[in-house]
Amino acid sequence: MFEKWFPNVDIADLNTAIYETFYMTILSLIGTFIIGIILGLLLYLTSKGKLWENKVVYGIVAAVVNVFRAIPFIILIVLLLPFTDFLMGTIRGPSAALPALIIGSAPFYARLVEIALKEVDHGVVEAAKAMGAKNSTIMVKVLLRESTPALVSGLTVTAIALIGSTAVAGVIGAGGLGDFAYFYGFQRRQTDVVILCTVLIIILVFVIQFIGDFISNKLDKR
Amino acid sequence: MITIKNLSKTYRTKKQNITAVDQLNMTIESGEIFGVIGYSGAGKSTFVRLLNRLEEPTAGEIIIDGKDIVKQRKNELRLARQEIGMVFQHFNLLWSRTVHQNIAFPLEIAGVPKKERKAKVDHLIELVGLKGRESAYPSQLSGGQKQRVGIARALANDPKVLLCDEATSALDPETTDSILDLLVDINKRLGLTIILITHEMNVISKICHRVAVMDTGKVVEEGDAVHVFQNPQQAVTKRFVQQLDGSEKYESLSSAVLNEGTGTIIKLSFSGENVNQTIVSQTAKQCDVDINIMQGNVLQTHSGAVGSLFLQLVGSETEVEKALNFIRSANVKAEVQELV
């Protein structure tokens, strides 16, 4: 059945490609989450009227975030080649794609984090202050905790964008489903490979969206 | 217990300086319920937020229990704040936490061990009457219940002072009453000093021992709550008093009623001091008169009834005279209303 519909697909290669896509998506998502939360918190806390109000820091962070969001991903990969080489010791394979993937999506997620934190009721932050809470407590137990549903749905959006980016990274040799579709499908004119890869990526996107919505709804007690 | 000296707060904007609180001086005794009333923009909310430095004072001293809050450094201030409870108009509960977890939050902040936290929170839930709702989330509670959580949370670290910033302004009248009862109960049971900010006159009259009336950043009138409302000096205070007895219309009877009535119509004025609560029925028993209650507006404050009551006395001239003397001997002002 499978061979009849997809005669040109090598199952072993496909499995490797799927594995590589998962590998890139999950690791870069973790990196994006950590850096995005840090940048997002910085953006929020240094903005006007907040705990660490600081125009200079805010300006710098906002500028960095905007610059990296503005660069198209495919160009970002090329720009980061020396950095990637220095960091990972190679510029090929799924691991080599990670720095570019993380640097490309962390600023995007940082903005979503900033928006999520802005939605936290200022009165609650004030109540925590009035109780004598430390800034660190306010950050972790009030700001981040109260915004978790938005942080999760933001992470879902970012994860889906990341899958797209992994496919782009595949074209310059990172492996994964994008790579698979490009070399076997496009360059060898094997349409069935392209279709299969597309279907798999669509399924992946749906599953991630479903899981993200589920978790976000579970966490939301409003 | 709390002494405030020359407390000021000025907001500087590019165009102008706005003085929200202007040279306040106040002393609040330990264990009293002190009310601050004013219309919006009077500076009362800023004032209460200065007390725990949610707003930084521009000048002045706030001495709570011998320590000047204004001079305290960040860490000292944090510890001092743990001893000042605060209740907010919009409750400001963490929606991601249950009732139990919300009340436990200040204890977590103060570093109370988990076991003690549980016992403490259970006790507080009992105190504010929320037993059975421990694991509900704030979104599942009514406004009154939310404020009970807010009060329990504010009491968690055994504060010396409780600040209430318009704590009942978002609640309906009935719920307001139940929250005020809870505050009085806490004040009596724990001997807690309560500073209460409001724009609602009935809140003051119901529970406050002393009151300060604020207008444009200044205290324009201050003193014993009943006394201030009995003899309002300032225009603002007079407006608040009218809000209380529903305007002046109950202060006199219409002439039609006066002329149609038989017998003698008298007006009793209650001023809140040692009022014999059963004055009407006692008069009827002591003297041979029939009494008809015509109109009145009497408000129960915590130091007695305040207001006026119109009675129609039917009986012989001597018995009516006797009744008047009896009423006057009970320290109630009684005036005979002349027919028009």
Image: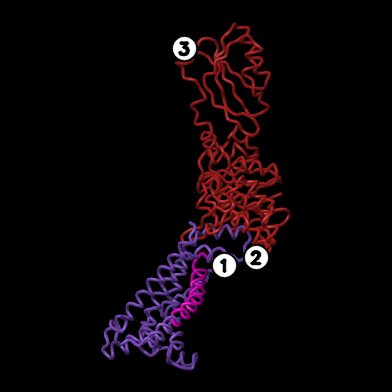
Residue interval drawn in magenta? A23-51
- Chain holding disc 3: B
- Which of labels 1 and 3 is toward the front? 1
- Amino acid of disc 1: Val
Which color is chain A depicted in? Answer: purple
Q: Measuring from the top left, give residue B204's x and y in whole percent.
A: 59, 39
Camera-side residue of A148 and A8: A8
B5 or B247: nearer the viewer: B247
Which chain is red in the picture?
B
Residue A56 in view of the camera: no
Determine the secondary structure under disc 2.
helix
Q: Is residue B289 visible?
A: yes
Return the chain for callout 2: B
| Image depth: mark 2 or mark 1 in front | 1
Residue A135 placement (x, y as % from top left): 59, 67
Q: Which subunit holds the residue at mark 1?
A: A
* Quarter occupied by residue A154: bottom left
Above or below, A218 relative to B183: below
Q: Report how far apart the C-alphas of labels 2 and 1 lie in the structure.
A: 19 Å
Residue A98 in the magenta stretch? The answer is no
Circles 2 and 1: CB atoms closer than 8 Å: no
Amino acid type, label 2: Lys
Find disc 2 in the rendering and name its residue: B74
Q: Which residue is mark 1?
A: A140
Q: Is residue A45 magenta?
A: yes
